[in-house]
């Protein structure tokens, strides 16, 4: 690492990627229950499907700090627990198991076989495991295949052999699976192409004659070597293999999926082939061939079937029929294949069928789906196509077969699991006037595209909201006796009275409770076994079982101002500043402690902790006074009400709460004192259980209002509800046990309290204005989404209105006009045709066609698309900008760049256009003004000094708005290839090139020239950039790197010097570029492709940080370090952690000037002794380290 | 001489083991083919990259993956005529 760099960034992930690259199914806990393990980016996550609710919930997630390329589950014979094999980019094979008791993964084997990195000949791309768990094969795209024999030793531990090689040079592998051969020698099947001859033949004949072959590799367990047992040519377009059950369950062999057909192959069987049915319909091209893109085989008692999915998302059920002998017994000889339409689901990267009758669809784009099987399509009217009618020879032509797609008949959608993947563009802005900005993003592909609003916060569901006549000041719930499971009363306190509501079938007022209804209430508590107390300003009312009431009156001329209670103790503060303490006697009466403690100021709040399990009392009383202090008083019998410690605060405390919470530093639970201040600041300090000392204070600003605190229960854990201008929840993270403080996605509450009833076991009740609400908790990170028409490409915000303009385009999709004319055409001949909803079935496709539109979305009021404008003439929108033109009195226009007849690969187009639209109806509609033809697609547009800058090919051009078209003002070729992005500050323009990094250009107004003056020395395939300051630009590239470049100070000054810029123009270029080079400041490999970068704040009062979003749904940030000491600290911490958990990051330069915050946060997960060891190594305490790590995150983000 | 022989043998072993290890007589065709195949295998191996291209092309990832592998078969096209 370049330690000399003078810029340091702390990289953190706010949200891990949501794209699932691979999903596997198995009994990883060793019980009958099946779990799903998914790999997304570097995260390995285990999920538990819940068949009763039809939901999938993640139970544990592990960051592996590498790229997971392949996963496989296997089970040793006789065992009932599945292990997981991981093929990664580390050049090693990893076998892990899931340990349910500790809820973590445990590494069993880690065997090195090659270089690290994703390389052509280093195995890891393909992974196949023998179904009996005896061997696995790990292969690379080209040449290398390694077979490991898996076994168990006498201690029943899993063993792994040294690798056996089955290499074949100059041979590419298209697919690799294992064969089901029962207990015979394990066999692996591969689809291979040998290109050695084509590389030697200049005539190209050998290339034409290349065959794709299906190869069987047999592992001879006796001789311990691998042989290439059988190979036979298959269809040249074959791309996938599926295992056919063998042994006692079936004929063994493989299904070879190719373009337009599926063939059954095995070394000792005949081949059978069925075509893949094509969609019928007026808009469908009958010539278009389908390919199988994913599929799954499912075995049930004695039977099996395949579900194969085409590129349209249509799933087909494929059955194998076997020959029966005279007695009706199956002979194991295949007779025919049968295929029929099943249902249509989103195109999946993996399909999993659960034994409990569910289908898990890990979607390639957009949300993942979880379906329940209603039936298996056994007795429906779908036409079944049989292999009897088709020759097995791929060269024999046949008539295509067709089917009619329809809505779900066999599946029932149970749950959709949110996924941002692919996240194509985002904007961070505050449109709702909350205290923190929101992230607006567009993503998804085709008709499943969405616009999403991302807000940080816990989601709550509201159960009841009821209006009250007058405004209550506080609300409590209480049980009647200690053994009650649920709350019985809701007690509302008003300015001049108290109202008690009974919780039953309905919530209604009860009057015979013994509560004093003519005074406001300060506290309500269930005391001892079966009594209740009510603290009101005039005294304490003790309601004993059987309706007796004991009243302790407050001394004359004094009233109670604050109270704290638990199930055995009561403390009240009087207006005179005295504290009166009560404890419950053995006979259940409250006994006053004979001394009163006089405090220095007026007491504002009190708190007693819960009585710890097995103890008589909580030993501390926290007292907050208006002299901005919090004192801890002892309640131990021998030192009652003696001072233990004092904490000075910045403002008077408004609320206190002592509670025991799970803690990462100690490993168990720790007593915390939560303090809320009148200034809206919240503090959390650790309260020493023995000495009462306060330590490790952490501060957070919550909002503009005084903080109120209450203890609530969330998922069986105690948590603190902190109310300011927004409600927040403080809890221990389930995995790391570190303290989290997260806002609730809910209205601001005046008061909140725990609430538990039969309908809602863990809820809370709150007051907002005049109404009382109760609600339930749900998960984190709230999202608000609605659909878009096509794959979004970019979007911009209206300069003033909370509206966004999204440009969308889909390649190979018929435009609405073409679709319409086809449908009309067919209707005139055949009558009405049913149009399928594109959200589920996609749009009709056609090569060379583009469907594109501009949509206006309103994420705030209507939460929907408010206006759609389709583009015509096969134009596809490629860029968008809102540009104010000074020639039009600074009126802002929407400028959209389009490309006509575009082809993506190889890139070509029939020219481009720049469309100008005027905003109508406050931006809710668009009026077309004119369009200007340009020679190449304008991939980048930007408003610049009252004019329009457009990147057209390698030319940067300045336009002004004319009456009939845009008027060219000035232009210059500034980059080598194609401009894809523009940023500006002042007269400086940062131009990003599709593969030549960024170039800084200065615009000289006087001379009207554009002069490139500094560029980069490395070719970066830039995706997006953001200017961090006038000299510095942050950017991301297609290979997953994030970087920051700075223009040397002197060069920057020279560029802005007054005058003609002649010195810039005439300066000699350096190595076919501009005269100067940018300096690389920061470089980091993100494991995702950055699609947008922003310099912004994420929390109120936070510092400016760089936030980036990645294609797979990652949201991350770069936090600049403020001091050199912090850098040193985190560098050494990172080094210590790297020794514990060696990270491997791909990329040419893994990291320059960046501390991996995700690695640093692994510290929370370490066992306690390791934490102490590292802490000792760094000469700091564990708490101090944890505090520093969590501060880095919470100061700027969530 | 023995040293030279050993170096040569080492180099040959490397070339056999790691495809693309160059030698003094590497032709332009070999070199470009090798770079192309390396690139395509990297696109197939890095999932975000494959996903990026699949979104751009409007095709499922599996189809893009197959397309890339097919391009690996082709390499840099037909080799040049060799002069004997």
Image (cartoon, coloured by chain):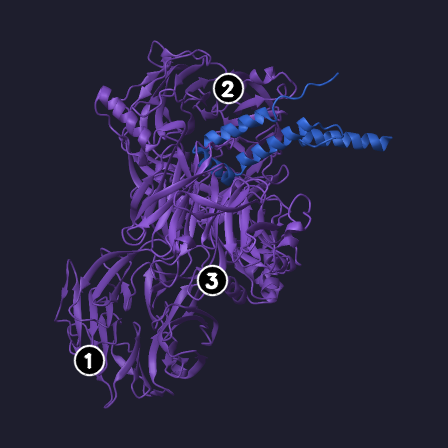
Chain colours: A purple, B blue
The x and y percentages for residue A1159 are 54, 54
Task: Please give the residue where the numbered disc 3 appears in the rendered image.
Answer: A1196
Which numbered disc flags the more N-terminal residue, 1 or 2? Answer: 2
Give SS at disc 2. loop
**Pointer 1 with pointer 2, Cβ within 8 A:** no
- Subunit of label 2: A
Q: Which residue is mark 1?
A: A550
Q: Nearer the viewer, mark 1 or mark 2?
A: 2
**Which quadrant is home to the N terminus of chain A?**
bottom right
- The residue nearer to you, when weighing A867 against A559, is A867
- Of the two numbered discs 1 and 3 on the same chain, state the one appearing first in sequence: 1
Tell me where residue A843 sits by quadrant: top left
Q: Are marks 3 and 2 on the same chain?
A: yes
Distance in Å between CA atoms under marks 3 and 2:
55 Å
Kindly tell me whether residue A152 is visible in this rendering.
Answer: no
Q: Chain of mark 1?
A: A
**What is the x, y in percent for residue A725?**
33, 67
Residue A797 seen anywhere in this rendered image of the structure: yes
If you read the primary sequence from the N terminus, does the residue marked by circle 3 or circle 2 appear first?
A: 2
Q: Secondary structure under badge 1?
A: strand
Q: Quadrant of residue B71?
A: top right
Q: Residues within 10 Å of mark 2 (few under 14, many from 20)?
A: some
**Image point (17%, 69%), residue name:** A500
Q: Is residue A50 left or right of residue A294?
A: left
Residue furthest top as drawn: A326
**Same-chain check, marks 1 and 2:** yes
Q: How many marks?
A: 3
Q: Respond whether the residues carrying marks 1 and 3 are from the same subunit.
A: yes
Residue indicated by mark 2: A236
């Amino acid at each position: 690492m370049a330690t000399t760099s003078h810029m340091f960034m702390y990289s953190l992930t706010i949200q891990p990627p949501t794209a699932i690259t691979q999903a596997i199914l198995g009994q990883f806990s060793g019980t009958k229950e099946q779990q799903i393990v998914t790999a997304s980016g570097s995260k390995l996550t285990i999920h538990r499907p819940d068949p009763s609710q039809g939901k999938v919930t993640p139970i544990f997630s592990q960051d592996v700090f590498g790229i997971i390329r392949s996963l496989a589950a296997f089970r040793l014979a006789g065992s009932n627990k599945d292990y997981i094999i991981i093929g990664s980019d580390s050049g090693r094979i990893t076998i892990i198991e899931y340990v349910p008791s500790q809820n973590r993964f445990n590494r069993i084997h880690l065997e090195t076989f090659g270089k690290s990195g994703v390389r052509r000949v280093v195995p890891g791309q393909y992974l196949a495991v023998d179904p009996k768990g005896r061997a696995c094969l790990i292969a690379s795209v080209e040449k290398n295949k390694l077979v490991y024999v898996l076994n168990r030793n006498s201690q029943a531990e899993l063993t792994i052999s040294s690798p056996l090689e089955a290499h074949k040079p100059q041979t590419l592998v298209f697919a690799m699976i294992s064969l089901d051969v029962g207990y015979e020698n394990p066999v692996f099947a591969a689809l291979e192409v040998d290109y050695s001859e084509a590389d030697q033949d200049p005539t190209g004949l050998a290339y034409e004659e290349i065959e794709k072959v299906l190869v069987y590799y047999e592992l001879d367990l006796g001789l311990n070597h691998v042989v290439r047992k059988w190979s036979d040519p298959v269809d040249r377009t074959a791309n996938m293999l599926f295992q056919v059950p063998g042994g006692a369950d079936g004929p063994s062999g493989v299904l070879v999926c190719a373009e337009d057909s599926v063939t059954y192959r095995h070394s000792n069987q005949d081949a059978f082939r069925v075509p893949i049915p094509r969609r019928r319909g007026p808009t469908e091209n009958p010539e278009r061939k389908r390919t199988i893109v994913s599929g799954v085989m499912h075995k049930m008692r004695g039977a099996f079937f395949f579900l194969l999915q085409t590129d349209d998302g249509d799933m087909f059920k494929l059955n194998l029929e076997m020959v029966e002998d005279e007695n009706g017994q199956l002979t194991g000889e295949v007779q025919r294949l049968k295929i029929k339409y099943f249902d249509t689901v989103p195109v999946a990267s993996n399909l999993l069928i659960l034994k409990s009758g569910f289908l898990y669809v890990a979607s390639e784009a957009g949300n993942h789906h979880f379906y329940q099987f209603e039936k298996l399509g056994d007795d429906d009217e779908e036409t079944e196509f049989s292999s009897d009618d088709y020759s097995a020879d791929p060269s024999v032509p046949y008539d295509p077969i067709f089917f009619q797609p329809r809505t779900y008949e066999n599946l029932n959608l149970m749950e959709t699991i949110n996924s941002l993947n692919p996240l194509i563009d985002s904007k961070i802005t505050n449109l709702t006037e909350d205290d923190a900005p929101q992230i607006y993003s567009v993503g998804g592909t085709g008709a499943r595209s969405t616009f999403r609003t991302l807000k940080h916060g816990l989601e709550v569901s509201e159960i009841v909201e009821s209006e009250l006549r007058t405004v209550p000041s506080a609300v409590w719930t209480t049980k009647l006796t200690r053994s009650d499971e649920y709350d019985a009363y809701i007690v509302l306190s008003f300015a001049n009275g108290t109202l008690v509501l009974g919780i039953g079938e309905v919530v209604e007022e009860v009057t015979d409770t013994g509560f004093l209804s003519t005074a406001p209430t300060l506290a309500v508590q269930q005391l001892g076994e079966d009594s209740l107390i009510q603290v009101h300003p005039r005294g304490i009312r003790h309601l004993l079982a059987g309706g007796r009431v004991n009243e302790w009156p407050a001394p004359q001329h004094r009233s109670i101002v604050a109270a704290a209670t638990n199930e055995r103790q009561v403390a009240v503060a009087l207006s005179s500043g005295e504290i009166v303490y009560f404890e419950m006697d053995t006979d259940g009466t409250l006994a006053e402690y004979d001394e009163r403690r006089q405090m220095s100021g007026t007491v504002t709040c009190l708190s007693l902790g819960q009585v710890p399990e097995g103890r008589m009392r909580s030993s501390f009383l926290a007292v907050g006074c208006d002299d901005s202090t919090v004192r801890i008083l002892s309640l131990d019998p021998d030192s009652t009400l003696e001072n233990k410690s004092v904490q000075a605060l910045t403002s008077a405390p408004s609320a206190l709460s002592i509670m025991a919470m799970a803690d990462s530093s100690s490993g168990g639970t720790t007593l915390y004192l939560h303090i809320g201040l009148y200034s809206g600041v919240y503090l959390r300090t650790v309260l020493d259980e023995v000495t009462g000392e306060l330590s490790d204070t952490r501060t957070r600003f919550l909002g503009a209002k005084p903080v109120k605190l209450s203890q609530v229960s969330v998922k069986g854990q105690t948590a603190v509800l902190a109310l300011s201008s927004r409600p927040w929840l403080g809890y221990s993270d389930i995995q790391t046990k570190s303290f989290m403080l997260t806002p609730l996605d809910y209205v601001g509450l005046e008061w909140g309290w725990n609430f538990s009833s039969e309908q809602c076991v863990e809820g809370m009740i709150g007051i907002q204005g005049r109404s009382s609400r109760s609600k339930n908790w749900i998960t984190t990170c709230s999202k608000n989404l609605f659909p878009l028409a096509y794959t979004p490409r970019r979007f911009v915000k209206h300069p003033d209105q909370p509206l966004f303009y999204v440009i969308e385009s889909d390649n190979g999709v018929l435009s609405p006009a073409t679709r319409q004319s086809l449908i009309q055409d067919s209707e005139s001949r055949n009558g009405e045709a049913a149009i399928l909803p594109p959200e589920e079935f996609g749009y009709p496709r056609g090569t060379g066609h583009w469907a594109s539109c501009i949509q206006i979305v309103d994420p705030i009021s209507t939460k929907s698309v408010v206006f759609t404008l389709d583009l015509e003439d096969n134009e596809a929108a490629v860029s968008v900008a809102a540009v104010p033109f000074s020639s039009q009195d600074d009126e802002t226009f929407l400028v959209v760049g389009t490309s006509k007849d575009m082809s993506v690969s190889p890139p070509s187009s029939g020219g481009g256009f720049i469309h100008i639209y005027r905003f109508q109806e406050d931006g809710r509609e668009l009026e077309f003004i004119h369009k200007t033809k340009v020679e190449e697609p304008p991939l980048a547009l930007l408003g610049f000094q009252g004019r329009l800058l457009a990147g057209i090919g390698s030319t940067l051009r300045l336009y002004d708005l004319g009456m009939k078209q845009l008027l060219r003002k000035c232009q210059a070729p500034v980059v080598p290839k194609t401009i894809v992005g523009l940023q500006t500050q002042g007269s400086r323009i940062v131009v990003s090139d599709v593969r030549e990094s960024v170039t800084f250009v200065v615009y000289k107004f006087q001379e009207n020239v554009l002069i490139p003056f500094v560029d980069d020395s490395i070719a970066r395939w830039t995706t997006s950039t953001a200017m961090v300051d006038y000299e510095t630009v942050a950017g991301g590239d297609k290979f997953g790197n994030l970087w920051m470049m700075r223009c040397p100070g002197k060069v920057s000054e020279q560029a802005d010097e007054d005058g003609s810029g002649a010195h810039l123009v005439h300066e000699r270029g350096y190595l076919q570029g501009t005269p100067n080079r940018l300096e690389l400041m920061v470089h980091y490999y993100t494991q995702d492709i950055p699609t947008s970068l922003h310099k912004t704040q994420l929390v109120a009062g936070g510092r400016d940080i760089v936030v980036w979003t990645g294609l797979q749904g990652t949201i991350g940030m770069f936090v600049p370090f403020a001091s050199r000491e912090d850098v040193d600290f985190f560098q050494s911490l990172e080094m210590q952690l790297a020794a514990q958990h060696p990270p491997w990051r791909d990329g040419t330069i893994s990291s320059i000037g960046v501390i991996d915050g995700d690695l640093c946060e692994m510290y929370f997960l370490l066992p306690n002794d390791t934490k102490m060891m590292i802490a000792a190594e760094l000469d700091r305490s564990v708490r101090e380290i944890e505090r520093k790590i969590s501060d880095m995150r919470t100061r700027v983000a969530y | 001489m023995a040293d030279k022989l050993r170096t040569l043998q080492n180099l040959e072993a490397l070339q056999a083991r790691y495809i693309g290890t160059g030698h003094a007589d590497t032709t332009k065709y070999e070199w470009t083919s090798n770079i192309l195949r390396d690139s395509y295998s990297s696109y197939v191996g890095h999932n975000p990259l494959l996903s990026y291209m699949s979104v751009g092309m409007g095709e499922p990832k599996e189809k893009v993956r197959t397309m890339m592998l097919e391009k690996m078969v082709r390499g840099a096209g037909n080799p040049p005529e060799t002069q004997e």
